[in-house]
Image (cartoon, helix red, strand yellow):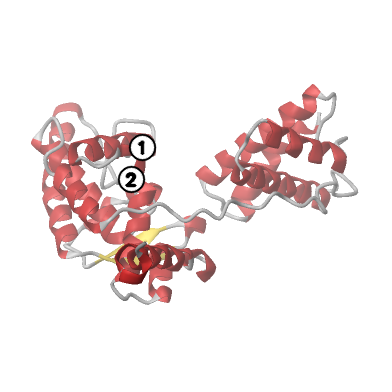
Amino acid sequence: MSHGWISPFLEAQAAELNASENTLLAYGRDLKDVATYLTDKGLDFETASRADLEGYLIDQDNAGMARSTRARRLSSVKQLYRFAYEEGLRNENPSLHIKGPGRDKALPKTLSMEEVDRLLAASRTLGRTETDKVRNTCLMELLYATGMRVTELVSLPVSAARGDPQFLLVRGKGDKERLVPLSPPAREAVADWLIRRDEAEEVARVEKGTPPSRFLFPSRGKLGHLTRIRFFTLIKDIAVAAGVSPETVTPHTLRHAFATHLLQNGADLRAIQTLLGHADIATTEIYTHVLDERLKALVLENHPLAKS
């Protein structure tokens, strides 16, 4: 069965394109879903035609799957068939001329400055121990000060934070590195956390012989650092404590808030692109639309001629 193409495809993505673990997991989930559909039809990737693949997309649409999900899954299929064609596994590419549904062009959800202030204040009080509170403060201050992706934040090496740095070296998508400046509150939060973290690491070394962690936010789990899922849960708890709707607060909305607030205060779009680690300026330009919407709402709510 050509469903066995998935593993070598993922290996090639990792080796040749240096795809991240999260990207590989997403590819794997999408392709397994397509494979299941084809198997139910008595087909596989080797025998599927363009019509069969389009039938899958129609089936997804009928099931109410979001346009963005359908577009992503088609992209995964196209990548797989490109790989299969280049490797000689198929002598034609049935996905080549399939047009996708496109992606929903919804504006990114963000937070007001007042909401962010409440979240930062709440992080200082949430936690079972004082060490938890100091860690939570550091996580939130770093996230808002730098606009890091959640994976970049939780997997940050402790070496990057030593010596009271004014900048952090962040390793982002595609293993690309970028420098992000630290605000004074973030530098203070990092310094306070390092003291607590190093004390806990020393206790673990003396009492249990545990080797020192290379991560700023260590964990006993197999990854060795705080997981994305744990931080996602934590930020929801902080939102509740701050009186901000937890439905509107995720690590990514803090990243959006970082970019939107910079733009509101006059930052250059190219500078924001560099700070966020966007490969294409078009990705960053979405924040200008967020600002446009806010300015339009401001006029409609406050201009005397806009009122009935």
Query: Looking at the rendering, in which quadrant would you find the C terminus?
Result: bottom left
Looking at the picture, does residue 78 appear above or below residue 227? below
The residue tagged 1 is 227
Query: Residue 173, which numbered label?
Result: none
Give whichever of discs 2 and 1 has the lower sequence position: 2
Q: Residues within 10 Å of mark 2 (few under 14, many from 20)?
A: many
Mark 2: amino acid: Val
Looking at the picture, does residue 99 appear above or below residue 126? below
Image spot of residue 20 (x, y percent): 52, 48
Q: Quadrant of residue 277?
A: bottom left
Q: Nearer the viewer, residue 215 or 245?
A: 245
Q: Residue at x 81, y 48 (%)?
A: 95
Q: Which type of secondary structure does the marked residue at label 1 adopt?
A: loop
- Horizontal side of 16 relative to 239 (left or right) equals right
Q: Residues within 10 Å of mark 1 (few under 14, many from 20)?
A: some
The residue tagged 2 is 154
Mark 1: amino acid: Thr
Q: CA separation, marks 2 and 1?
A: 7 Å
Q: Is residue 159 visible?
A: no
- Horizontal side of 107 relative to 153 (left or right) equals right
Looking at the picture, does residue 219 appear above or below residue 296? above
- Horizontal side of 137 relative to 276 (left or right) equals left
Q: Are marks 2 and 1 in contact (CB under 8 Å)?
A: yes
Q: Residue at x 44, y 57 (%)?
A: 172
Q: Is residue 204 visible?
A: yes
Image spot of residue 164 (x, y percent): 16, 62
Query: Looking at the rendering, in which quadrant would you find the N terminus?
Result: top right
